[in-house]
Image (cartoon, helix red, strand yellow):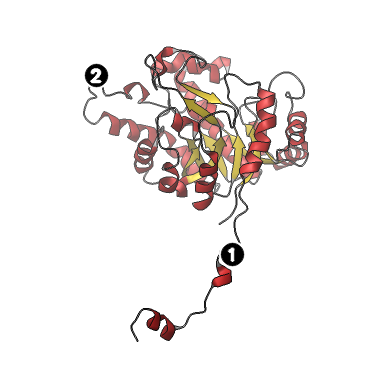
């Protein structure tokens, strides 16, 4: 077994207009000063990377690596682009915020733009020597999540068939460049649990580039077994967001949240160590199934300051990394193979 790499940090929640968070060079130095060894870059953040230039220029990618000051780039995250591959009309206006102003109120043009951006992220990742692109699936069926009113027969199958068709050209591009797309299992996406992942995987013809980004916080908020998921889908898990959460069911509110804000909801994201997730079991289970890529902090907490969360997160992840064994703990008592002795022990001679 190989060990998990880390700690790393997803920069999306930290990048802003103020130094040191407003350039790749300065935010990398900040992350490195906290003890992080890797950064996951949001591909949509133009302060950190020009994704189109990175897709077409290896020299620019070398420049990008140089700006990181020795800290590794773990992945280029493409969630906001992936989200726009499949948008139900009910969400058009809300998700327009993820695209260029000139494309707003033009869903088809926005979708075409998202296709091109996803392909750019794939090409840029290949230029940077990366193997995985984390993303969202988007959603055509989320408004049908609850079976009332009764869903028309066949509509779920049709929805996943359409979703797979939308993603097919992107998946084929990923395959051409030797890249896996790690779909984050996430409420609001059509891929939000194991069953929906299986539906999508089947609809794509078991496409070899269909993989998983595992984030246990989204399992807690759905009352889904985040440990049991790992041995079932371990071969597909190619990216890992380390994020904590808690679920406080009450007589007033459950997993749907009652349209409340994050502070009042039953399910809330927390800084690492402040929630309900047993990360010792998470890291052990991931290591056991052979996950050997990065453990990436995704900080989202309704209570704690972001910089405190980042500072504590580096230490938290580092303390959970497992140096995998090179030999069995009981090798000192090992006995050599001897067929006759084995038969005697079994009472056969």
Q: Earlier in the sequence, mark 1 or mark 2?
A: 2
User: Is 312 located above or below residue 229 in the figure?
Assistant: above
Q: Which residue is mark 1?
A: 327
Q: At numbered mark 2, what does the secondary structure look like: helix, strand or loop?
A: loop
- Decide which of 205, 196 is in the foreground and name it: 196
- SS of the residue under disc 1: loop
Q: Which x, y percent locates residue 291?
A: 54, 49
Residue 240, image x and y in percent? 55, 39
Say whether residue 319 is visible: yes
Image quadrant in which you'd find residue 16: top right
Q: Nearer the viewer, residue 67 or 116?
A: 67
Viewer-proximal residue, 131 or 185? 185
- Can you tell which quarter of the image residue 68 is in? top right
Which residue is located at x 51 percent, y 28 percent? 245
- Asked if residue 232 is positioned above or below residue 21 in the image, the reply reads below
Label count reads 2
């Amino acid at each position: 077994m190989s060990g998990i790499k880390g700690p790393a940090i997803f920069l999306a929640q930290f990048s802003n207009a103020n130094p040191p968070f407003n350039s790749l060079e300065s935010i990398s130095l900040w992350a490195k000063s906290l003890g992080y060894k890797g950064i996951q870059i949001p591909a949509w953040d133009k302060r950190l990377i020009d994704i189109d230039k990175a897709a077409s220029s290896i020299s620019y990618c070398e420049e990008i690596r140089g700006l990181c000051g020795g800290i590794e780039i773990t992945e280029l995250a493409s969630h906001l682009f992936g989200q726009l591959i499949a948008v139900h009309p009910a969400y058009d206006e809300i998700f327009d915020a993820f695209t260029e102003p000139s494309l707003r109120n033009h869903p088809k043009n926005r979708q075409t733009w998202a296709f091109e951006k996803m392909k750019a992220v794939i090409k840029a990742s290949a230029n940077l020597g990366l193997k995985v692109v984390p993303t969202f699936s988007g959603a055509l069926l989320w408004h049908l999540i609850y079976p009332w009113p009764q869903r028309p027969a066949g509509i779920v199958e049709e929805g996943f068939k359409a979703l797979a068709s939308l993603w097919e050209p992107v998946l084929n591009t990923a395959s051409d460049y030797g890249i896996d797309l790690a779909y984050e299992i996430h409420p609001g996406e059509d891929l939000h649990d194991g069953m929906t992942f299986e539906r999508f995987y089947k609809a794509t013809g078991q496409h070899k580039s269909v993989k998983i980004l595992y984030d246990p916080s989204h399992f807690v908020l759905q009352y889904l077994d985040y440990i049991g998921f790992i041995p079932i889908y371990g071969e597909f898990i190619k990216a890992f967001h380390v994020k904590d959460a808690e679920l406080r069911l009450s007589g007033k509110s459950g997993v749907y949240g009652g349209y409340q804000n994050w502070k009042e909801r039953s399910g809330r994201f927390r800084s690492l160590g402040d929630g309900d997730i047993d990360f010792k079991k998470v890291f052990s289970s991931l290591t056991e199934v052979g996950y050997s890529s990065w453990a990436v902090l995704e900080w989202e907490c309704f209570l704690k300051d972001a910089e405190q969360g980042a500072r504590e997160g580096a230490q938290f992840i580092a303390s959970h990394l497992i140096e995998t064994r090179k030999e069995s703990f009981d090798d000192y008592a090992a006995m050599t193979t001897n067929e006759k002795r084995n038969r005697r022990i079994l009472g056969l001679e």
